[in-house]
Amino acid sequence: MAITLELPQDLESQLAAEGAHLGMALPQYAAHVLLGSRRLPETAPGTSGRSADVTPLEPAETRERRILRIRNFRSDQYRLLDDLIVTLHREGDHYVATSYDTGQYGYGLCEEDAIEHLCVVLEDYYEILQEERDNLGHQLQGHLRFLESILTRP
């Protein structure tokens, strides 16, 4: 299913500029903004104030796309009940961390920033799904059930 949106010119220009700054095409960045989050990790690009808490599932030397188990959700609002499995890969100058179970992703100039951004996106996504619980289609209900199974309040 394709969705076509007509954006006001000033919003389209702003999204195009933000997306270009991050190395993302307008359609990709607009979808990220509309379905995910525009908040970036709270740390400066290329740095991190938190430890990785990440366990690779495959040897680093043999892969372009890594599969990781995240144990620290990097949030004051939620903690993980179980490991969050994500894929991590590089796109140009940025790293992209993707949640296989929800299709959501985060990006950053280093791996830790991409993982942290993914956690922010998933937190926002979870809260939106909870608010819209009664209006969700089958796939989004599955995403909500998954997030409910791994996230809890501290």
Image (spheres, rainbow, N blue to C red):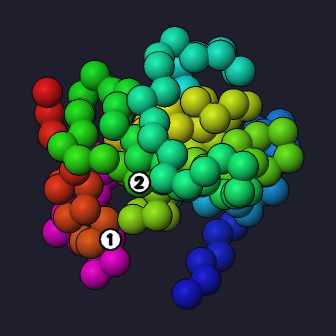
Image coords of residue 22 (percent x, y): 78, 39
Give the x, y percent position of residue 29.
69, 53
- Dot in front, 1 or 2: 2
The quadrant of the rendering that contains the C terminus is: top left
The amino acid marked with disc number 1 is: Leu
- Please name the residue shown 48% across and 53% down the image: 57
In this rendering, position of residue 110 left or right of residue 92: left
Q: Quadrant of residue 144?
A: bottom left
Give me the residue at 55% from left, 54% from top: 58
Residue 26 appears in the picture as rendered:
yes
Q: Secondary structure at mark 2?
A: strand
Q: Secondary structure at mark 1?
A: helix
**Amino acid tagged 2:** Ile
Q: Is residue 14 left or right of residue 1?
A: right
> Vertical placement of 137 versus 81: above or below?
below
**Residue 85: image tag:** 2
Q: Camera-side residue: 32 or 113?
A: 113
Q: CA distance from mark 1 to mark 2?
A: 18 Å
Which stretch appears magenta?
126-140
Q: Earlier in the sequence, mark 1 or mark 2?
A: 2
The residue depicted at 51 percent of the width and 46 percent of the height is 56
Main SS, magenta residues: helix
* Residue receiving disc 1: 140
**Quadrant assignment for the N terminus:** bottom right
Say how many tags the image has: 2
